[in-house]
Amino acid sequence: MGKALIIGCGGVASVTIHKCCQNPDVFEEICIASRTVSKCDALKEKLGGGKTKITTAQVNADNVDELVSLIESFQPDVVINLALPYQDLSIMDACLATKTNYVDTANYEPPDTAKFEYSWQWAYRDRFKQAGITALLGCGFDPGVTGVFSAFAQKHYFDEIHEIDILDCNGGDHGYPFATNFNPEINIREVTAKGSYIENGKWVETEPMAIKRVYDFKEVGVKDMYLLHHEELESLALNIKGVKRIRFFMTFGQSYLTHLKCLENVGMTSIEPIDYEGQKIIPLQFLKAVLPDPASLGPRTVGKTNIGCIFKGIKDGNERHYCVYNVCDHQEAYREVGSQAISYTTGVPAMIGAMLLMQGTWNGAGVFNVEEFDPDPFMDALNKWGLPWQEDLDPVMVD
């Protein structure tokens, strides 16, 4: 059917690339591009025997001119941005310059400020609309599938949704005293930032990890979870009509929290540059360099994830509760694509979003979050491509 340019070659990109190659009727040709082209070449060597034609390229995703040149050379139908969130705007600029559709999994975050919100990317709405192209934002799992779950619940189960709790549980064990399951720099910035949630249309800010709940996750068990700020709260508050409260919780084990607190106390999670032997370094970037690469965790991670949404609202004048979620097994994901479940649950939705754009199932000129499109084709695709969802019509609510 068409061509996709995939920018990035980390754990999530590897999953998306595997899935594109499993879907050659849509992804007839892909180009894998990264600053480190050897990683791209290794994936091409591994997957190049199938029907999908694979090429590779070296590109600096911070450099708009390089990106434009690559897009003009390859002429893709869609660019799938699986690079760092710092690079979202440069890639969007290149897509605008070449009138190419765009997909990402995480919203823009400035390199020098631990702050992530949609304002920078939503500012592109008019330009993408005028160019006649689509930008699909946050098409991973959370954000991403959680937005589709919300749209699905709104379409099929509620007249009004009043409360949404997003629960992200990783019950996996990689055996390390301390490691992160996705990019350490992004993960630690996210966890050490102040928490926040939306209540009656207003943001309520909390100290980092200040709000804790205990929840029994199906197929995983009882876990401690903590309220964090997360970007999909912002878009869901805009797109799910009548919602009054939206919260995001993520599970953490005590070993992770103890190590993180120690690293924070000694300054290793700081993003402020320091002088070290005559040069400027950022402590968090140095920490990232010495921690295990998340892409290497697949062989040793066992257990399951459970990620989903619990809704409270009204249907036909009566209060209704509803939960929809996915359970993903780390080892099953590794056997299929060579990655653990955190990468898998993000990489599969990125392929699905790009597929729906290429097929014209999801279409529109402008900048969109996933919950703005019809959820049903995406929900069907989740079941087909490895992330089957389950429902609970009488879920245990979070207090």
Image: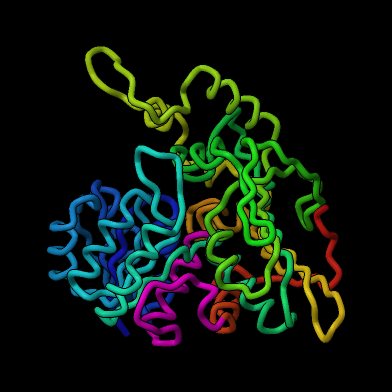
Residue 97 appears at what percent x and percent y?
Answer: 18, 69
Q: Quadrant of the N terminus?
A: bottom left
Residue 43 appears at what percent x and percent y?
Answer: 33, 56
Please name the residue shown 27% across and 73% down the image: 127
> What is the total number of numbered labels drawn onto the structure image?
0
Q: Is residue 377 left or right of residue 134?
A: right
Please name the residue shown 73% across and 82% down the image: 159
Closest to the observer: 381 or 68?
68
Residue 375 appears at what percent x and percent y?
Answer: 57, 80
User: In the figure, 392 relative to 2: above or below?
Assistant: above
Closest to the observer: 72 or 309?
309
Question: Is 362 within the magenta?
Answer: yes
Label the magenta part by its dominant secondary structure. Answer: helix
Q: Quadrant of residue 123?
A: bottom left
Q: How is the image coloured?
A: rainbow
Please name the residue shown 62% across and 56% down the image: 202
Closest to the observer: 206 or 327?
206
Question: Is 208 within the magenta?
Answer: no
Please name the residue shown 58% across and 48% down the image: 229
Residue 352 in sight from this viewpoint: yes
Residue 25 in sight from this viewpoint: no
Q: Residue furthest top?
A: 277
Q: Quadrant of residue 122?
A: bottom left
Residue range in magenta is 345-374
Residue 241 appears at what percent x and percent y?
Answer: 63, 75
Closest to the observer: 165 or 118?
118
